[in-house]
Image (cartoon, helix red, strand yellow):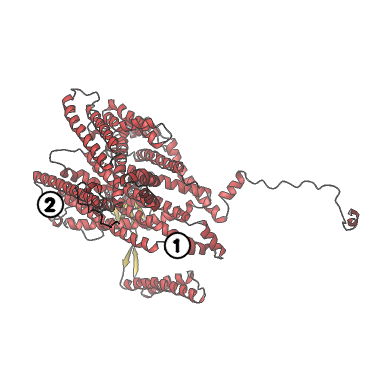
Amino acid sequence: MSDTHAESIAFVRESSLPPAAPPEKVGGPFKWVKDNLFPTWANAILTIVALYFLYLLLSGSLPWLLNGVWNASSLSECREILDGATGACFSVISERWHQLLFGFKYPSDQYWRPTLALVLLFLAVAPVLFIDLPRKLLIFTGIYPFLAFWLIWGGPIWGPVFALLGVIVGYMVYARLVHNSFAKALAGGIVAAAIVWYVGGIIGDALRPARPLLEAVPSRDLGGFMLNMMLGITCVSLSLPIGIALALGRQSHLPIVKGICVVFIEFVRGVPLITLLFVANVMLAYFFPPGSGVDLFIRVVIMITMFSSAYIAEVIRGGLAALPKGQYEAADSLGLDYPQAMRLIILPQALKISIPGIVNIAVGLFKDTTLVSVISLFDIIGMIRGPILASTDWNGVYWELFLFASVLFFIVCYGISQYSQWLERRLATDHR
Amino acid sequence: MTTLTDPPKESFRPSMLLSDTRYRSITFQVIALVLLIAAIWYLGSNLAANLRAAGLNISFQFLNNPAGYDINQTLIPYTSQSSNLQAAWVGIINTLLVSFLACITATIFGVIAGVLRLSNNWLVRKLMAGYVEIFRNIPVLIWILIIYTIMTAAMPAPSAFRGDDPASSMMLGSFAFTNRGVYIPGPIWGPGSTIVVATFVASVIGVFAYRRYATKLLYDTGRLLPMLWPSVVILLVPTIVMFFFLGMPIGLDYPALKGFNFRGGIQIGAPLIALWFALSIYTGAFIAENVRAGIQAVSKGQTEAAAALGLRSGRIMNLVVLPQALRVIIPPLISNYLNITKNSSLAILVGYADITATLGGITLNQTGRAIECVVLLMLFYLVISLGISMVMNVYNNATKLKER
């Protein structure tokens, strides 16, 4: 059959064509630049504007940053070294390093104590942050607050020891009773802890040593970035349980409990933190028994904790509301009572949903701890605006100090938010 | 044979207060109420005892006494002989002023940065991400201080503008940036200026009326009227005609260097600028994230469906994407406005006379009436916050998705 076509095919090529040039290379840096920076005319203009802006930013700041002076004892000496050239005077940071970190009154031979507390802090929060670590480490997390208190404030060791003992006894009583009834267990635990604290207070007074192992540091001597860290960590960890309680109270069907929680939350969220700090500074002392003399640090901690617990309560309420109603009904149908349903079914899920919100509040709160400089506590901003800029040596070194404080806050806050994103991915169970 | 009998009627036992759900809720509420009353009574009695010991009483008489201090930036008449109440009013108006200005500029910054973060230009996207991360992770208090320092330490003094060959010169001949603030030209209202303003207001109403008419015409008949250029014409032409017809009644008062300082025009003090700019650029970073989240919340299917209907890309944005994105964007936007109002209380750091600096600062320190001042201060912020959240609830209810 093949020869029937012999005439219909007029021409058959006998030699092969020379190979065509390969198609233009797809990919590589050139294509990336074309696709991402200059895809259209408008985009190209945008890129050029952005590049120019970047150039302005870098040409302004790089010489200043790279030409910085790190070893001078005053601004005038710094200017002599620079001799008219552009350059930062970072020596203020190296010279006032301890003041910026610990404040200007903390005894200088005791700086190792807050430093050790910070190192141990990482050890204590590690098992909370990373659920893969052995659970035994949580015991150290439980001990840490008392240890850190003793390290930073010093004084007789009996106070923290008995406080810890009270918590342990209270927890043991709670653990024995909780299978029977949650309310009874909670009340029993609190009563047991209170008894231990009361007895411990009497014993501790009797045992007060003439010279404590660690020199006592009054809380008005705390300062610098250490104060920001302490306020942030203390207030966030205290406000978590209070926030959960407030959120549950706001969701409750009991009108009086609900009313109390709503009024508290809306009141605290409605006023700026600075007015609450004014309350701590000038007003709160009037509400304590005459002569009790609660110091400013504790008063500030009370007010900031109130502030953040109201915000955390709202975040957790969002988490509770986001749970499908079926979860509540499933818990009921299993015959669980309210505390059991909350502890075993509702809260673990609701808290997981609320993690990003809680982290946002924590970051915001940590930034807001700088507000205490307004009521004349010497945190890092208070140190910069007060003793350092007012000194004759460093009067006029604004940028270096503000840059240093900004970098410290940026590292901590950015680190926390990156951690929260990692945790969200880690806990994601919706298998998308 | 069996007879049906009523179950034995349970008599009330005290243990049922805890074990029976019918009574338990009452028990808990009574306990809560008793605890609350006890706490209030305890705090109240402490307060009374402390006040007695200090020889103080609660009285708001001090509000009528002369304040005795000067305020550098006031929008309403005020002298140091005015009452403390008047000083508080000055503070309230200053708080509202800076909050209002910062809300507007923060929205502008935020929308621009949020939209550019979604741009397909890699460099712009990264720059905007950098802006958002840097501003969100550094306390607003540091930003206020930095910008205040730029305003006071890096700007030239008014004396630098003097002489034949001055070190600094006014921008466009009418704006002066000095370390005491920014001086801008102010309007002079001549006779007949009210008519010009009234014409302008009428034109604005006219623009809205025209747009409504055009929309109605489109829905009724399908005829499409041009929108942009008639709006511009209606807005500007009558006002300009009236302005020249009446012989230019509105003039500009340019600031000029007289003596040691600038006179004339409007002075915007360095504290106001620092606070305004810092609050808007800081909150702008938060708003940018809200805007981005809102736009990303509109599913891609919506855009594709609109494109399948044959809509142009501008119309897809206006008619399909934006209305849905705004539902997501506006609630956090309003709470950001609330944050601006609350953060404006940081004015006390840079010496801007807002309510916290007048009532909660100088008045409190001079009169020693701590409790009264702080309570009034909180009351003011509470009223603002509750008012704004009421507006937000109304909005949320109006835009709630109506399903089923």
Dot 1 or dot 2, earlier in sequence: 2
A98 or B392: nearer the viewer: B392
Type of the residue with mark 2: Ile
Quarter of the image where one finds residue A80: top left
Residue name at image x 56 percent, y 49 percent: A36
Residue A28 placement (x, y as % from top left): 62, 43
Q: Which mark is residue B323?
A: 1
Q: Quick check: do tags 1 and 2 share a chain?
A: yes
Residue B90 placement (x, y as % from top left): 23, 57
Q: In which chain is the residue bearing label 1?
A: B
- In the picture, measured across the screen, residue A403 lies left or right of residue A383, that is right
A4 or B3: nearer the viewer: B3
Type of the residue with mark 1: Pro
How packed is label 1: few (under 14 Cα within 10 Å), some, or many (20 or more)? some
How packed is label 2: few (under 14 Cα within 10 Å), some, or many (20 or more)? few
Residue B229 placement (x, y as % from top left): 48, 70
**Residue A225 in sight:** yes
- In the picture, measured across the screen, residue A282 lies left or right of residue A70, that is left
Q: Tell me the SS state at disc 1.
A: helix
Question: Distance of mark 1 from mark 2, alpha carbons?
Answer: 52 Å
Find disc 2 in the rendering and name its residue.
B58
Q: Which mark is residue B215?
A: none
What is the quadrant of the N terminus of chain B in the image?
bottom left
Farthest residue to the bottom: give it. Answer: B221
Q: Tell me the SS state at disc 2.
A: loop
**Residue A324 in sight:** no
Foreground mark, 1 or 2, reads 1
Residue B373 placement (x, y as % from top left): 19, 51
In the depicted structure, whether residue A408 falls above or below residue A53: above
B356 or A269: nearer the viewer: A269
B29 or A223: nearer the viewer: B29
